[in-house]
Amino acid sequence: MTKLSHTEGRMKRRERFRGGMLLALALPGVLAVSACGGGGSSSAGGNAGGAEAFSAVSCGDVPVVEPNDPDGLLKDLPEEVRAAFNGWPDKIEASAWAGLESKAADGPITVGYLQQDSGSPVAAALSAEIKRLAKESKAAGDVAELLIETPGGAGGEVTAADQVRAFEQLVRKGADIIIAQPLSGEALVGAVNSAGEKGIPTVTFTGYVASPYALNISPNGFDSVAQTVARGVEMIDGKGNMLIVQGIEGMTVNTTSVATAEQVVEPCEDIKIVGSPAGDFSDPGAKSAVMSFLASHPEDIDLVYQVASMGAGTFAGFADAGREDMPVILDNLPTAASIAWWEELRPGGYQGLAIPGTGTQFGEALWEVALRTMKGEGPKINQIALETQFITDENIDQYAVAGATTTSAEETETVGSLLPSEYLDGYFTTPGQ
């Protein structure tokens, strides 16, 4: 297996990408991509829309795609922030809260939390972190109360109307700011605007709400996929067969993730995408889909990209199909189980790549942005891109959970922040106030 390159050639390609990204953001008159009004929520994060490549790329390069920034707001932000918005599909607007004076200075605030009760490890960890940080902030005198609403209907089904009612209940109960995990960002626009007109900001995670009153936090669904697949291409020296393991066909985030992976590989004449089975965003589904595909495709597979949270199932599918050589698996949002697979294969020379993200990190990001806003730091725009980080052979031990097996249900260890303080400062007018 070819080792992940850190050569001078790789660095030069990365610099070309960053330079091209900044040039694209600075040029006037280039058409912005269309905003997506959706708001589907999944562990993959982000909502996607159509986008046109700004420049041609070679095999293994990250495409430069203009973000949806019709008013040119990104040009006034720090370089590190601008570069994080490559291909950003949702409309970037000036935040309505840029001039908000500190409400925390007048006494402890009340935080509303619209949570999703999906039962997943990520959702559970996110909720636990919000509650932990609320307790900590109460002790510090910044927060008076955490109000929690969990939308739900008959038979455990949750509708867009359920989440709107739960959101409005938080407003009625006196929330000063609301943290939300929208089922449908589009359905929540009216309620967020109404709350905003009353002076109540909303901070969302992976459910884009098209409103200047919202602060939408999300991974960059285009750039994170593009970076991952580009690095995977290097790991197989730009040659071989590639498999894409989809989540749910037709879901916006899935469709865009697949399209982005295909766009990155398109210039690679020696890489062939041989299939794209769907694993339903679950390990059992991914295992079944991969095994079924391999049963009728005896050719070697060299590279696999799984859209999100199906790493362990993808590994298991290849193993149970009797494939002797495990392909490089690009593992988006790995679990403790998929990291255990990786570590089990390492003695035989396996090297992988993963994009980490835990519910704990997502909860921390939401809480930090909410408190900064209420302390009067002044968010500049209505979008905040989580940093894209990678798990490699050099740092995998930090993410491995002691005692975890290839069937464990928990998340990886949480390592650092997806919104480092210095990076997050770039989104605010008066950081640290």
Image (cartoon, rainbow, N blue to C red):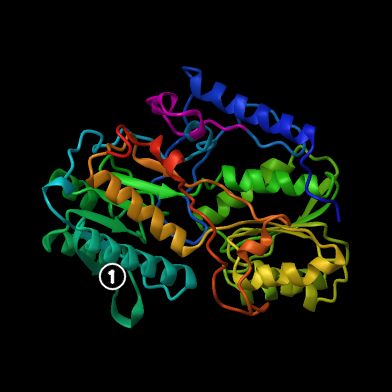
On the image, the x and y values in percent for residue 259 come to 62, 47
Which image quadrant for residue 172?
bottom left
Q: Residues within 10 Å of mark 1 (few under 14, many from 20)?
A: many
Q: Quadrant of the C terminus?
A: top left
Is residue 399 found inside the magenta-colored segment of the image?
no
Q: Residue at x 57, y 33 (%)?
A: 65
Extreme-bottom residue of the structure: 155
Q: Residue at x 49, y 49 (%)?
A: 219
Is residue 79 found inside the magenta-colored segment of the image?
yes
Q: Nearer the viewer, residue 15 or 280?
A: 15
On the image, the x and y values in percent for residue 47 come to 46, 49
- Magenta residues span 64-80
On the image, the x and y values in percent for residue 14 come to 68, 33
Q: Residue at x 75, y 36 (%)?
A: 10
Q: How many marks?
A: 1
Q: Which residue is mark 1?
A: 151
Q: Nearer the viewer, residue 140 or 405?
A: 140
Q: Is residue 349 above or below residue 225?
A: below
Q: Is residue 89 above or below residue 135?
A: above
Our reading of the magenta stretch's main secondary structure is loop
Q: Quadrant of the N terminus?
A: bottom right
Q: Inspect this view and state whether residue 257 appears.
A: yes
Q: Nearer the viewer, residue 65 or 104?
A: 104
Q: Nearer the viewer, residue 101 or 242?
A: 101
Instruction: Indicate the secondary structure of the residue bearing disc 1.
Output: loop
On the image, the x and y values in percent for residue 344 come to 76, 72
In the rendered view, does 414 fall on the left or right side of 314?
left
Q: Inspect this view and state whether residue 115 appears.
A: no
The type of residue carrying mark 1 is: Pro
Extreme-top residue of the structure: 28
